[in-house]
Image (cartoon, grey):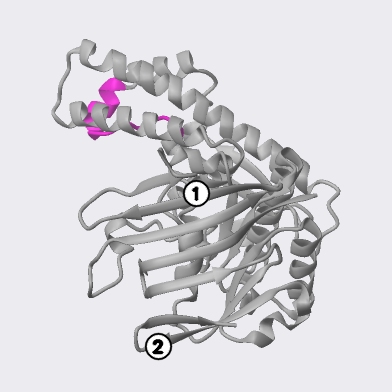
Amino acid sequence: MCACFVKSLSLSHFRSHRLTRLKLDSRPVVFHGANGAGKTNILEAVSLLSPGRGLRRAGVEEFGRRPESLGWKIKADIDVSGRAHELETTAEPGQARTVRVDGKSRPQIALGRIVRIVWLVPAMDRIWLEGAEGRRRFLDRMTMSFMPEHAEAVLAYDKAMRERNRLLKDMVRDAHWYQVLERQMGDSGAAIMSNRNATLERLAKAQTGAETAFPAADLSIEHPNGVLLTSAGHLTDLLESGRQADLRAGRTLIGPHRVDMRGVFTQKGVPAEQCSTGEQKALLISLVLANARSLAEDTGAAPLILLDEVAAHLDSIRRRALYDEICGLGAQAWMTGTGAELFTDLGDRAQVFKVVEGQAGSEVRQ
């Protein structure tokens, strides 16, 4: 199996890091240190080597180091199956985030076609218990890892829906104002649902027969009121027929933005929301590993895996199993924890760094 890994990473005025430079090989990377030292900020920087707002879903203005409020920059040299790429993303105060790939300005989606990144952070731990929006976002992130163009479909759908919702709030009743927007929502919405369904099939296949210490999760998409969205024309017709109800509500009540993702602990047949806290975490890890396995099969290279504070929530058996699976995949996983002892089972299979809070900001020591 070929590898996708970061060979060097440079952070300038990013979060708590005034200037941090790392030289790396393809092994997993561990950062340990006290809470607040700046470990997660490094993983967040790596997550911004993919399209979107990163693992914290932060706005571009939040990335700059304070109190300087200067522009920030992330630069990385990436090896993808032996092919080198230089990725850079940056923003000046008050400006939008820009991306350069191999020295040329590119749209964010270009990042997703070069490096695939999957992640799990503590904020996701309650994904099975909270609202459907978080589960949709989790599913869409996995979908974008397989199909970077999924981001364009989501953006197109959201843009058309915002314009339609504006008409609804203004109580505009002229059908001509709606028809173009509803066709756009039908086309992009059908692509979204098709991509999501394909992702669930890939994850199911990646979990079937896999020898793992983590439980399999059976995922499904739940449609509001049981109304299946089967095609672009069908969704367009539903939007047209539901226009009066939407006018009363002041928003669009049907579409891929309203579906939910449900999970079941396969071996026990228990819905994920009814599982124990430990089981819910194990199901999430299982899905992230399945995502990584499937990507490795598709692309020939394991993706980058970002795991923030994951080790502290696992017993020693599952912790060892997680490390063995990561190394078996040949993935460069980036992991954080408060103590180096959490990663003892990795031995020399990992590169280990200590992150401390220095006078000039976060410092990374080997």
The residue under label 1 is 50
Residue found farthest to the top:
176
**Type of amino acid under label 1:** Ser
Check disc 1 and report its element: helix, strand or loop: loop
Q: Earlier in the sequence, mark 2 or mark 1?
A: 1
Quadrant of the snapshot with the C terminus: bottom right
Q: Nearer the viewer, residue 49 or 177?
A: 49
Q: Nearer the viewer, residue 23 or 185?
A: 23
Q: Is residue 227 visible?
A: no
Question: Dot 1, crowdedness within 10 Å: few (<14), some or many (≥20)?
Answer: many
Q: Residue, x 43% and y 37% (percent of image)?
A: 258
Question: Which x, y percent locates residue 101?
Answer: 47, 44
Q: Does the magenta segment cover residue 244?
A: yes
Between label 2 and label 1, give the one nearer the viewer.
2
Q: Alpha carbon of mark 2 to alpha carbon of mark 1: how far?
A: 29 Å
Check disc 2 and report its element: helix, strand or loop: strand
Residues in magenta, as a range: 243-256
Q: Are marks 2 and 1 in contact (CB under 8 Å)?
A: no
Q: Answer with left or right where residue 31 lies relative to residue 101.
A: right
Q: Does the magenta segment cover residue 30?
A: no
Question: Which x, y percent locates residue 224?
Answer: 47, 35
Q: Answer with left or right where residue 100 lies relative to residue 365.
A: left
The residue under label 2 is 358
Question: Dot 2, crowdedness within 10 Å: few (<14), some or many (≥20)?
Answer: few
Q: Residue, x 81% and y 46% (percent of image)?
A: 208
